[in-house]
Image (cartoon, rainbow, N blue to C red):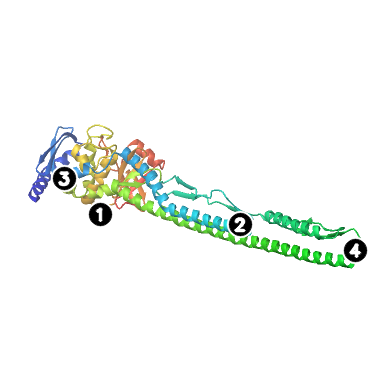
Amino acid sequence: MRLKYLLSFLLLALFASSFFQVASSHAKQILFSKQEDGSEVLFNYQYEDTEQNTAEIHFSLDRSAIGKSESLLLANDALNRAASDFVIVEGKKTAEKHLLALQESFASGVQAINSSIASFNGNIGAKVISITLKDPEKLSLKLELSGDKFLDIRVSSLVPGMQFHSGIEALSAKLRADCGMIVAQANKKLPRGLEFTIVMQGSSISFPLKNDKTAYDSGTRARANQEISKTSARLRSRINLHKQQVKEVGNFADATKARAKELIKDSSAKLAVARKKIINDMKVKRSEFYASHYLLPSKKDKERTLLDYARIANQSVTGLLPLARAFKDSADSDRERVANALHFFQNIPYNDLTQGKVRGFRGFSPPLEMLSENLGDCDSKTTAMMGVLQTLAPQLKVALFLVPKHAFLGVELPVKKGEVTYTYKGVTYVLMEPTGPRVRPMGSLIKSSYEHLQAGRIDDIITLDGS
């Protein structure tokens, strides 16, 4: 294996100088071929300039590395659907898991309150208090999956409001009935001309004794006084019992209301904890999902999902070493080496990757897969060049610029007069277009890229450190 790599490097170095002499006069790729040789794939690129001077570049790539690159990503549109399905399904599953215990706890608390009310009502023989719930069975769970769906999961709960009503009227009715029965019994035993009556004034009740002024003998008066005294005692006792029951009802209502408030307060606290737990769990699941599919959320537009270009470029560095070393040996300065690499990628035939022979991708081809197919679009070529520059000029900072429907590259180089640049986080980048197919020097952009730049329409800027 080492011998094969050494040979490929020697071959590459042999042809590199002639290629880059041709490249300096805007050579075009005229032939591309590849051939499998054991565990490696040998690549041959042929170029010709306007004066019909020709040159070749040969290098080899590990076949298994190319295979991994080809299977790196799902189709971009499939990724977006998968991300959307993941949010909806996993978001609801996660929320329901954390809120199920809360719902059960709340329902149990309501049941306990209602049981104590029923028990109290049974003890005093009347329904003296009622509890009104908007929804006594469960909490109403609402998920709002909006904004950055993975981060902005809003969980709200319609915690029922509780209202208490003192049903003292039932006790008052029973008081009137009991007192009426006592009075009726007494009136049957009182002498003719004497009788009790019931008088209600607001919430109070009195029992005046009516006398038609009939004269009674001493014995009749004694029996009447005895009955009046006994009846008055019975009535006072019943009224006192009523007062005690009313007091018990009031105390129970206050205690029950306090328990209900505590239940709602506890449920609200648990809801806040559950919501935080849901969001934290979803952040973890989002990170795992993004990591497995090489995705990132856009910093500018949270509805937009990006490929993790920096990670893809970083993981491609080892596979791109043979190509990067050739560029390193092609010139004496970083500027010339970057220019040679730019020319190489511009000469790879352009394809928007939405159809054709590129396998399994829509709109993006990872670096080794792109070299293997000799086809690429803007972000595919730019990502591959980022990976090459990590070996070619590791001291230089590079960044991928995303504008509407396009991508181009920025490299930290000394700026020459007339070159288009952009300063981001204190670093000034010379901008360039690896896309091609037209050969374009460093520091120049196509018209649409320049217009987007001037209008501030930069969707995202991705550096190799992932910032």
How far apart are the alpha carbons under marks 2 and 1?
Answer: 83 Å
Question: Picture coordinates of residue 244 (x, y %)?
Answer: 68, 64
Question: As rendered, which of 97 and 136 lies closer to the eye?
Answer: 136
Q: Quick one: label 3 or label 4, which is nearer the N terminus? A: 3
Q: Which residue is mark 4?
A: 216
170 sits to left or right of 437:
right
Q: Which residue is mark 2?
A: 121
Q: Determine the secondary structure under disc 3.
A: helix
442 sits to left or right of 261:
left
Front tag of 4 and 1: 4
Q: Which residue is mark 3?
A: 64
Question: Picture coordinates of residue 286 (x, y %)?
Answer: 35, 49
Q: Quick one: label 2 or label 3, which is nearer the N terminus? A: 3
How far apart are the alpha carbons under marks 4 and 1?
Answer: 127 Å
Residue type beneath disc 2: Asn
Contact between marks 3 and 1 (CB within 8 A): the answer is: no
Residue 411 can be seen, yes or no: no
Q: Which residue is mark 1?
A: 395
How far apart are the alpha carbons under marks 3 and 1?
Answer: 29 Å
